[in-house]
């Protein structure tokens, strides 16, 4: 009977060994080229203009901040950053536009506390979940509100105001730019933490509310430091406290509400950059890196200070944690206020 060997001939084994060596060598040669290509793609971003969508009309403080950051990012990135104002519906028009954009790093949202952290609780019919629909790029700056009262109101500090409100339940009023605005929710948090009954009066914008404050038709309001600093300095209104955890550089003599009898009171309004979910990590990394350089510039810090704001540098992960924290923080405040929007 013929016998058959299962062992390959020596020549075949040598050919197989040679082929495997060539294959290994090919992998070693092409791997660096592949990695180089990836690195090159990351380094080449961006290759065209970037659109920065702002959820408020042109001319306001948010728009001014967005244009400041956009201008300096343009210089850092070597490409125009074009500001596109999409105001209306509490910022939902802008968030929907950015969420629907191609996630390639060329469409960004100038996000705010309102659009990212308050709207999820305020709107019942949001088409876009701000938490799930975006990748955090980085926080930009933060600012605070200040509690102001008419000169004729018999209260010179927070404790006296709280005492007055407790003496006259339901008699004092606070104005705001509208339901769900940061100055409305500042008032609601103040009301809750102080245990007082004050009545919310919503207006179509802070300017209208402030006009009535000057006329003594409302008792108090929370407004941005940048909007009020000139009126406080000229003595047209009394500033009782700022809403942040620390005193404002623009109003160093005005105590925080937390140090004035309501420990833990903190309303900080922040701004940042967000990108559509799925944006390439290399684009997010490049944007964040250049943003940190912008926020470190002395002239940028000076211009932010003029807007009543301070730089808020950090990683994308830091910004994501900030958003998550404030979503949880504002949900119960919105619920307690009874404010809802469709």
Image (tube, rainbow, N blue to C red):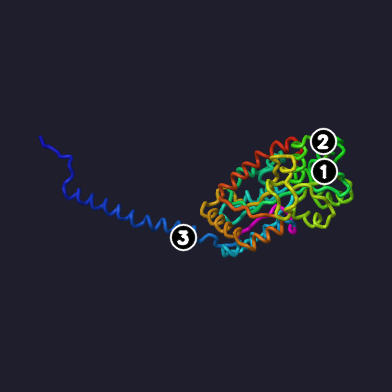
What residue did someone put label 3 on? 40
- Between marks 2 and 3 in the image, the one whose residue lies nearer the viewer: 2
Magenta-drawn segment: 50-59
Q: Which of the numbered marks, if any, corresponds to residue 222?
A: none
Marks 2 and 3, how far apart at CA: 61 Å
Please provide percent x and percent y for residue 56: 72, 53
Marks 2 and 1, how far apart at CA: 11 Å
Q: Earlier in the sequence, mark 3 or mark 1?
A: 3
Instruction: Report whether 204 appears left or right of 73.
Output: right
Quarter that holds the C terminus: top right
Please provide percent x and percent y for residue 298: 62, 62
Mark 3 closeness class: few <14, some 14–19, many ≥20 residues within 10 Å: few
**Please, is residue 98 above or below residue 48 in the view?**
above
- Between marks 3 and 1 in the image, the one whose residue lies nearer the viewer: 1
Quarter that holds the N terminus: top left
**Please, is residue 280 above or below residue 261 in the view?**
below
Q: Is mark 2 in CB contact (under 8 Å) with mark 1?
A: no
What residue did someone put label 2 on? 197
What residue did someone put label 1 on? 174
- Residue name at image x 65 percent, y 38 percent: 328
Query: 28 or 205: nearer the eye?
Result: 205
- Please, what secondary structure does the residue beneath circle 1 have? strand
- Please, what secondary structure does the residue beneath circle 3 have? helix
Residue 49 position by quadrant? bottom right
Marks 3 and 1, how far apart at CA: 56 Å
Mark 1 closeness class: few <14, some 14–19, many ≥20 residues within 10 Å: many
Q: Earlier in the sequence, mark 2 or mark 3?
A: 3
Please provide percent x and percent y for residue 192: 75, 36
- Please, what secondary structure does the residue beneath circle 2 have? loop
Residue 177 can be seen, yes or no: no
């Amino acid at each position: 009977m013929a016998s058959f060997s299962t062992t390959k001939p020596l020549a075949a084994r040598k050919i197989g060994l040679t082929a495997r060596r060539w294959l290994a060598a090919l992998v070693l040669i092409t791997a660096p080229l592949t990695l180089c290509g990836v690195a090159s793609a990351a380094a080449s971003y961006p290759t065209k203009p970037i659109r920065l969508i702002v959820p408020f009309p042109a001319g306001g403080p948010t728009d001014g901040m967005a244009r400041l950051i956009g201008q300096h990012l343009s210089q850092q990135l070597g490409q125009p950053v074009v500001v596109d104002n999409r105001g209306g519906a509490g910022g939902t028009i802008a968030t929907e536009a950015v969420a629907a954009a191609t996630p390639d790093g060329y469409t960004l949202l100038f996000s705010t506390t309102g659009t990212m952290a308050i709207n999820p609780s305020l709107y019942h019919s949001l088409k876009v979940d701000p938490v799930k629909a975006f990748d955090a790029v980085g926080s930009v700056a933060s600012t605070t509100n200040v509690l102001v009262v008419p000169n004729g109101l018999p209260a010179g500090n927070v404790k006296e105001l709280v005492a007055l409100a407790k003496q006259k339940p339901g008699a004092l009023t606070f104005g705001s730019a509208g339901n769900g605005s940061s100055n409305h929710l500042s008032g609601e948090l103040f009301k809750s933490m102080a245990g007082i009954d004050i009545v919310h009066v919503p207006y179509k914008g802070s300017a209208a509310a402030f006009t009535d404050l000057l006329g003594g038709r409302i008792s108090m309001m929370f407004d941005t430091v940048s909007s009020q600093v000139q009126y406080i300095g000229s003595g047209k209104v009394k500033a009782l406290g700022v809403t942040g955890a620390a005193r404002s550089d623009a109003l160093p003599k005005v105590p925080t509400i937390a140090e004035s009898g309501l420990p833990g009171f903190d309303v900080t309004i922040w701004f940042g950059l967000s990108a559509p979910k799925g944006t390439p990590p290399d684009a997010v990394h490049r944007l964040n890196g250049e943003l940190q350089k912008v926020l470190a510039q002395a002239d940028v810090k000076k211009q932010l200070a003029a807007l009543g704001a301070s730089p808020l540098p950090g990683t994308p992960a830091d910004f994501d944690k900030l958003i998550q924290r404030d979503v949880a923080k504002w949900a119960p405040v919105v619920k307690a206020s009874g404010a809802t929007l469709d």
